Amino acid sequence: FEEISIPPMSNRKLKYLTFEMDGSGWNNIRMGFENLILLAHAMARTLVLPPKRQIFHMADKSAGRVFSLDDFYDIDVINKEQMGLNIITMEEFLKREALSGNLKSLETGESAYPPSNRTQWDNQRLN
């Protein structure tokens, strides 16, 4: 992937906060996610959930099952009850911003698109 940017706020209505679940265990992922909810809300940014993936220490018990944060949190309820907080999936973000040409290369300024215009990245390496 090349480095990309989203046009300045003056040209756009939305700003986003994205993150990727690292290779740590569930508790570290949970704490990171809860902090990101606070940051997104405080900074008035839409929080973008990472794609589903296996979680360290859970893979053995779940036979290779992949998880989303939506499996542990009721994202719809959080969106409804927390005024000013918006949470979307990575797939929705890529459809909304990447496929419409809103992500720009930091090197060239031209629109940057996901490889093969793919929006579904569950359990796939992102680098």
Image (tube, rainbow, N blue to C red):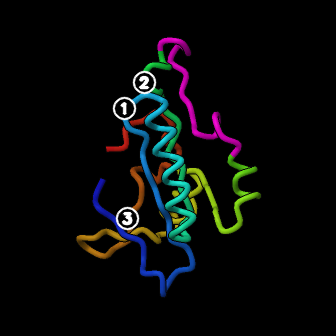
Image x and y of residue 3, in percent:
29, 61
Q: Marks 1 and 3, how far apart in space? A: 27 Å
* Marked residue nearer the N-terminal end (2 or 1): 1
Q: Marks 2 and 3, how far apart in space? A: 32 Å
Q: Which residue is mark 3?
A: 112
- Contact between marks 2 and 1 (CB within 8 A): the answer is yes
Q: Give the magenta part as a residue range.
A: 60-74
* Marked residue nearer the N-terminal end (1 or 3): 1
Residue at 54 percent across and 67 percent down: it is: 42
Residue at 47 percent across and 61 percent down: it is: 17
Label 1 sits on a secondary structure element that is: loop
Question: 88 or 2: which is nearer to us?
Answer: 88
Residue at 53 percent across and 12 percent down: it is: 61
Numbered tag placed on residue 56 in the rendering = 2
Q: Marks 2 and 1, how far apart in space? A: 6 Å
Q: Residue furthest bottom?
A: 10
Residue at 75 percent across and 50 percent down: it is: 77
Label 2 sits on a secondary structure element that is: loop
* Marked residue nearer the N-terminal end (2 or 3): 2
Q: Which residue is mark 1?
A: 23
Nearest to the eye among marks 2 and 3: give it: 2
Residues packed near mark 3 inside 10 Å, few (<14), some (14 to 19) or many (20 plus): many
